[in-house]
Amino acid sequence: MKYYIILLFLAFSLTSFAQKVEKDGKTYEVKKEKIFLEGEDVTETLNLEEKMAILKEAAAISEKLKMADKAEKEAEKLEKEAKKAEKAQKKAEKAQKKAEKELKKNEKLQKNFEKAQGNLEKTQKKYEKLKKKGKLSPEDEKKYLEKLEKLTEKLEKAKSKI
């Protein structure tokens, strides 16, 4: 970025000063329709063809400098747009990662809920089966009821998290 600013000032300074034109081995300076040779105004001493040729060449140089300046500005603009696009892409990637993390969390909560539900159902079936057969002592029955209560609480907790 620092180099672009330096180039911009350089291009601006070149356009604000006189244009140097080489013609017939002599270096002329053109400032606002006046032609100087070695610091002296020679506009009136040159014939019309030479004057027009020098002015035309100075205009061409000036135009090239303007085009270069315009190209620099365009390059800066493209660089800014690229940075902006990169920033937007990073933001989108971050949002996607956050969404994926949230999805994983929800899947894990759902899995925990289903596991708790399965454990509760399995334990209830086993309790019912043993109770039907009459193989439960009062202590075992108390333990099963406590276990079923804990599993029910666990299921409710998992359900509330979802």
Image (cartoon, helix red, strand yellow):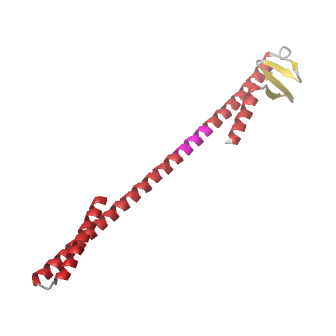
Number of numbered discs on residues: 0
Residue 125 figure quarter:
bottom left
Start and end of the magenta stretch?
Answer: 75-85
Q: Is 29 or 146 nearer to us in this picture?
A: 146
Residue 162 seen by the camera: no
Q: Position of residue 47 (x, y in %)?
A: 82, 16
For the stretch drawn in magenta, the main secondary structure is helix
Residue 159 on image: x %, y %: 27, 61
Q: Nearer the viewer, residue 59 or 25?
A: 59
Location of the C terminus by quadrant is bottom left
Left or right: 124 with respect to 19? Answer: left
Residue 143 position (above or below residue 38): below
Q: Is residue 57 magenta?
A: no
x, y percentage for residue 113? 28, 66
2 lies left or right of 110 = right
Q: Quadrant of residue 116?
A: bottom left
